[in-house]
Structure formats: C-alpha cells, structure tokens
Image (cartoon, rainbow, N blue to C red):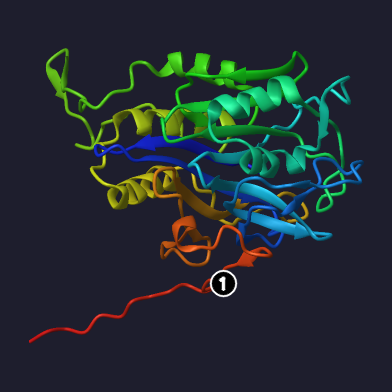
Amino acid sequence: MPCSGFTLRTADGRHFLARTMDFDQNPGARLMVIPRGWPIFPADAATKPVASPYAQIAMGVMAGGRALTLDGVNEFGLCGAIFYYPNFARYEGPADGKMPLSPSMALQYALASCRDLAEAEELFRDRASLVADASPVLGVAPPLHFMFSDPSGEAMVVEPDAGGLNIYRDTVGVLANAPGYPWQETNLRNYLAVGRKPCEPIGMENRVLQPISPNTVLWGLPGDYTSVSRFVRTAYLKRFLKQPQTEQEGVAAAFHVLGAVSVPRVRVGAQEAEAGYTMYTCAMAAQSRTYYFHTYDNRRVQAASLDKENLDAPGIKFYEWSAGQDIRWLSAQC
C-alpha cells in the first residue's frame, strides 16, 4: 500500500490535500456522500453508534453496513487521508476516559465530528484512543497513520507508534509510509543540493565536459518506488512547482506531481504476485469542498462537490463513474 500525499495552495488562496491510493487489490472503493446523522461505530466493540454531526464526501469501502473512509473532505473543508504505516504503527488500547476508536473508522469519525485541524488534534490527543480493532475488510487491524489539512492550508500528521500517539503540526505537507514523519523530514536534508539550475559544463584537463542532457534540473532525486524515495520526490517537486493560479490549475498541478510517484500495475516475485499499484489519484479542495479524482483505468479527471448535495439526506449517496479509459476523439477542421 505505497501511498503518497501532499498539500498544495494556489495563488488565489485555494488549498488541496492530494494523494495516490495504492494497494495490491481493489477493495471495492466507491465515491460517496456520508450525510449528517449517519450512524458511525467508533470501534467494532462499540454497540451504540454515534450520529455524524457533519457531512463528508469521501472515497470509501462499504463493509457490513459501515462506511470505511479512505480519504475525503467534510462540509467545513477539513480534508483527511489514511496511509499505510507497516512495522511502525502501534495502538494504545483502551484508555480511561477516552473513546475507543478503530484505525479503520478513525478518519471517517474525524471528518464527521471535527471542523478544523485544532478539533482533529483535540480528538486524537484528548478524546479518543486508537485500539487494535480488526478492519471488516482486511480481517486485521491495519497499520495506519493519518494526514489532515483544512482551509488554512496547514498539514497535520497523526502517527501511532512505539512512542505513543504523536501529532505533528507545521509540517512540510508531505506524507508517504514508513518510517515515521520526523525521520522522513530529516532525510530531506540529504537532498539540499537538488535545485532548479541546469548543470554547468566543467573543464577537465584540456577537455570541456558538457551535460549529456539539457534537462538536468532537479538532478539527484531518487527514482524508485520506496516510501523514502517517494517522500523525497514529492517534497522537492512540491517545493519547486510553479504555483498554480486557480483551483482548476491546482488540480492539474496536483496530478502532475503525483504522476511522478504513481505506481504502475506490475507483477513481481517468484509467484508473479501482483505488487501494489495506484488504484486512484485524488485532489480534495478545501474551499470548494470538491473531490477530484482519476482512476488507474481512466485518466480523465472526474469530480463531485458537497455544494451540490443534500447534506441531510436520509442515507449515503454513491456516485458512478466510467471504469474504462474515456477518450475524446477529435475531428479535423478545414
């Protein structure tokens, strides 16, 4: 599940949380609107659901009548996404005075009950305790960490690990998988020489060595698909990206950056098992509360917005999209 994500802001004050969702099999993800009042079970052990105060538009999976949010944006523009955190995630277990919260339900609950980063931080720090409840989709408690953003554009990372639950504010606005966020940020310092200037010719004895290619900007970025390399690539592409002017330009820019870390569908290993691949890529716009996305099989950008929906609907609304590649055929003009 090698996911990558980052935040992006436009010149006209729009903010995005964008990510790739990578997995080795499609769990049946669907784009949905979860309305106000929808019952949420914070943990599998909880027999009494909590009515959702706020609506959200999210990509999620339905399991046993429950919606498991993978990423989404709520009616206040709070955006969030789950990321796989293998070998590092540790859950506290039930804590006195705190609500037990299943990792697979944590994002949906946060988007359903928090208006901004401050409230999301307070939820994870003071009101809830992440417990090792098995996901109804995977059958085990998934090792997860979380990324949030809101209309301010700030990015917050929530990581449960051996040192307890850590919440990082004022981040560089990038997240991938393991290791944890502090290590990944420190590792960025190994690439401070990466820049936008093309390589200059150098003299060596009586020879002048010219760059082989004129396109030597951002020379030295790692090119593999490990979490560490994807984090570095995303961070530096974000750093040197020409700032988009509008929300529409921001969508295009977000997908171009994530295209550099999108994982193709390949087969690996002695048994030719399928590796994780990018099932979909999305960009969630905080101000317009719009969810933009394209899938692995259809690169056309599709979108839906909470502004066009009834947030007090009696049930979850699902969107349908074209599964195959949508190609626009052109006609030559005389």
Q: Mark 1 packing: few (<14 Cα in 10 Å), some, or many (20+)?
A: few
Q: Where is residue 184 in the image (x, y as percent from the top left)?
A: 55, 21
Residue at x-position 43% and y-position 32%: 233
Quadrant location of the C terminus? bottom left
Quarter residue 53 falls in: top right
Q: Position of residue 8 (x, y in %)?
A: 38, 36
Residue at x-position 30% and y-position 37%: 13
Q: Is residue 238 left or right of residue 138?
A: left
Q: Position of residue 301 (x, y in %)?
A: 41, 62
Q: Is residue 237 left or right of residue 309?
A: left
Residue at x-position 21% and y-position 30%: 211
Q: Looking at the image, is 277 positioned above or below residue 233? A: below
Q: Which amino acid does label 1 sit on?
A: Glu
Q: In this view, does 198 lie to the left or right of 35?
A: left
User: To which residue does mark 1 refer?
Assistant: 320
Q: Looking at the image, is 89 positioned above or below residue 299? A: above
